Amino acid sequence: ALGCVGGGAAALALFFELAGVRLNFLNFMALPITIGVGADYAVNVMRRHDRDPGAAHLAFVKTGGAVMVCSLTTMLGYGALLTSINGAVRSFGLAAAAGEVVMILAATLLLPSVVLLRERARGRRECRSTAAEALGRTPMPPAGGKGDGTRGALLGPQSSASRAGPMV
């Protein structure tokens, strides 16, 4: 979740640079608010994921909508600030709205991607360790067969792989 906040903050800094936004006292105050809100979104999604480990997609389907609605209402409030006649208030509204956009994107796109990649990597490691344990318990004969006329280690009727049963 912390990496998601860092990614969102980096995206916000990139936006400021590309849009030519100059920091002043008021729009600088949007930065800690943005980081706090982004952390809250990421933590909410990850807490849901912790309830159902291994089912990352369910966490994002069940929690993503609520987080998105929360973000949209916040963006509406910041968008209203863009109509102010005061330039400092407008700059705060722009900075805060941009921060909200990058943080919701980080929480709904970046965070699910990282969690899914982590789960897939963990699943591959568990699969490899399970296969190694299974191979350690039932050693397989050489690939060419036993030299006694059988068709080979994987295809022969007397091979250890056929006796061990399916590996799940």
Image (cartoon, grey):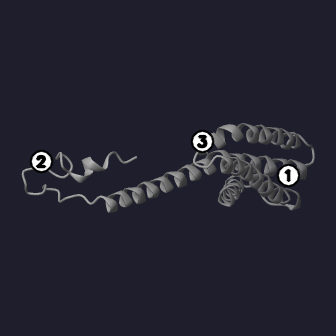
The residue beneath circle 1 is 92
State the residue at coordinates (12%, 48%).
151
- Of the two numbered discs 1 and 2 on the same chain, state the one appearing first in sequence: 1
Give the side of residue 11 with respect to residue 95, left or right: left
Label 1: how many residues lie within 10 Å, few (<14), some (14-19) or many (20+)? many
As drawn, the label of residue 44 is none
Q: State the residue in front, 127 or 94.
A: 127
Is label 1 in a helix, a strand or a loop?
A: helix
Label 2: how many residues lie within 10 Å, few (<14), some (14-19) or many (20+)? some
- Of the two numbered discs 2 and 3 on the same chain, state the one appearing first in sequence: 3
18 over 101 or under it: above or below: below
| Alpha carbon separation for disc pair 3 and 1 | 35 Å
As drawn, the label of residue 57 is 3
Q: How many numbered marks, from 0 up?
A: 3
Closer to the camera: disc 1 or disc 2?
Answer: 2
Is label 3 in a helix, a strand or a loop?
A: helix
State the residue at coordinates (78%, 42%).
71
Is label 2 in a helix, a strand or a loop?
A: loop
Q: Position of residue 165 (x, y in %)?
A: 32, 46
> For the residue marked with disc 1, what is the amino acid?
Phe
The residue beneath circle 2 is 151
State the residue at coordinates (40%, 57%).
128
Closer to the camera: disc 2 or disc 3?
Answer: 2
**Dots 3 and 1: beta carbons under 8 Å?**
no
Q: State the residue in front, 2 or 100.
A: 2
- Of the two numbered discs 3 and 1 on the same chain, state the one appearing first in sequence: 3
